Amino acid sequence: MTDSQLIREIKEGNLELYSELMRRYQRKILAFVYHMLKSSNMELLAEDLCSETFYKAFRSLHSFREVDASFSTWLYTIARNTVLSELRKQRSGNVPLEESGVVPIAPLENAPEHAVLRSERVMLVRDAINNLPEKQRSAIILREYDQLDYQEIANILGQSVSSVKSLLFRARSSVKTQLEPYFFGPVYEPYEGMKNR
């Protein structure tokens, strides 16, 4: 069944089919939420906010209209808004790190040297992405990690396609500038999907 068929069935009362929609999108939405939270060291909330996203989507499914956006675009938009709402809540509360439930992740000390180097590169790229302004970070995560096209990203972010391309250009330039001190030459360009496309 397509997403459209599933949604039509769910709207007609076959609520158990919503679990199939969740199964199709849960990993992608969880990864997106996780990356959005990473810059604020709040990754441990990713599963909760992913669940909240699916709950909100379920409650609002009756108002979903395919003529406005695809289901995946609509779902990513709900996820993004849920994360932004939580980030605003946390900032206004000024929750100390020890009370936020965030546990620092220990470095891989006993791994072979090449694995440690690769891990460090991954962290450098992720840190560079996490340092980006929110819209640039969202755009690059949706493009590079979730492989969405420009139109889908534009719909999720409420921007035009040309604005999305501009956001991605600025994001990639910023990441490149941040990584230059760590790499000699264009080593980072093909890394982690960070290609100019």
Image: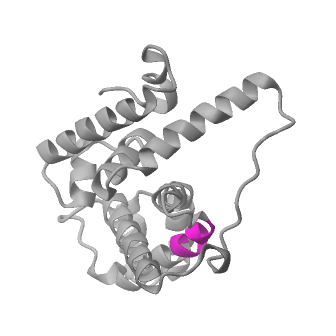
Is 119 rendered above or below residue 142?
above
Residue name at image x 83 percent, y 33 percent = 111
Q: How is the image coloured?
A: one colour
Image quarter where the C terminus lies is top left
Percent across and percent down for residue 120 are 64, 34
Say left or right for 59 vs 18: left
The residue lying toward the viewer, choosing from 182 and 80, is 182
Question: 181 or 89: which is nearer to us?
Answer: 181
Residue extending furthest top? 185
Write the residue at 83% across / 26% down: 112
Q: Inspect this view and state whether residue 17 appears.
A: no
Part of the protein shown in magenta: 44-50
Quadrant in the picture for the N terminus: bottom left
Question: Is 153 in the magenta?
Answer: no
**Rendered view: 126 above or below 86:** above
Where is residue 28 shown, x and y percent of the image? 50, 54
- Tell me which corner region of the image, top left, top right, bottom left or bottom right, holds residue 59: bottom left
